[in-house]
Image (cartoon, grey):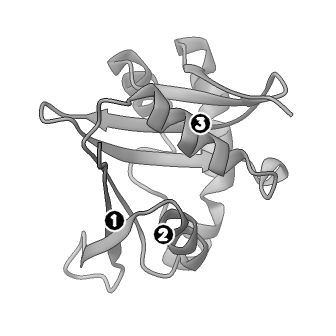
Amino acid sequence: MTITLSLAKIEDAEMLKSISVEAFTGDYEQYGSYPPGIESLAWHQSEIEKGHYYKIQYNDELAGGICIIPSYNELIEIKYFFISEKYQNKRIGSMTVELIEKQYSSAKAWTLATPYKAYRNHHFYEKFGYTKIGEFQPDPNNAFKLFEYKKEIVK
């Protein structure tokens, strides 16, 4: 099994959009909406052009994507991370976290937000040393909450 990360190209946008919508369908069913931008081809293209959107390949097949936002103080946010259902439970997620952290080895900390009822995600990130640091409601008129996680890198 070979997992590779490479910067996504504009021609990958349509497929990444399709995989992300499929991967986040459970969130849509549970919370009534997708993560912001996921359904928009223009959003995927824009993120690809920023240069920190990676495609995840499993044995040369497109399996998912990870979009990060690096900041000036070596803090990196995992904006979106998704893997097609047909590739889940094959350690692709774990290997992707290891690869992206290696790719940005100068990072001092990593952050992310994940839905409050995404128990699998909570367990997954905690396994890699992420700690819940807070929670917030993106829309005060909706009960939906996101949990914020952070991982400090000790060098």
Label 3 crowding class (10 Å Cα cut-off): few <14, some 14-19, many 20+?
many
Quadrant position of residue 46: top left
Q: Residue at x 50, y 63 (%)?
A: 125
> Which of the 4 image quarters holds residue 30?
bottom right
75, above or below 15, in the image: below
Structural crowding at the residue carrying mark 2, measured as other residues with C-alpha within 10 Å and reported as few (<14), some (14–19) or many (≥20): some
Quadrant for the C terminus in the image: top left
* Front position among marks 1 and 2: 2
Name the residue rendered at 33%, 86% in the picture: 143
Q: Residue at x 57, y 66 (%)?
A: 124
| Circle 2: residue type | Glu
Indicate the position of residue 36 as horizontal and vertical percent values.
38, 52
Q: Position of residue 51 (x, y in %)?
A: 38, 18
Q: Which mark is on residue 15? A: none
Q: Is residue 84 left or right of residue 24?
A: right
Residue 61 higher or lower than 134, as above or below: above
Q: Judging from the image, what secondary structure is the residue with disc 2 in?
A: helix
- 76 on left or right of 20: left
| Residue type, mark 1 in image | Tyr
Q: Disc 3 marks which amino acid?
A: Lys
The residue most toward the left is 73
- How many residues crowd mark 1 within 10 Å: few (<14), some (14–19), many (20+)? many
Does residue 83 show up? Answer: no
> Do tag 1 and tag 2 residues touch (Cβ < 8 Å)?
yes
Q: Which residue is mark 1?
A: 149
The residue under label 2 is: 126
Say which residue label 3 marks.
17
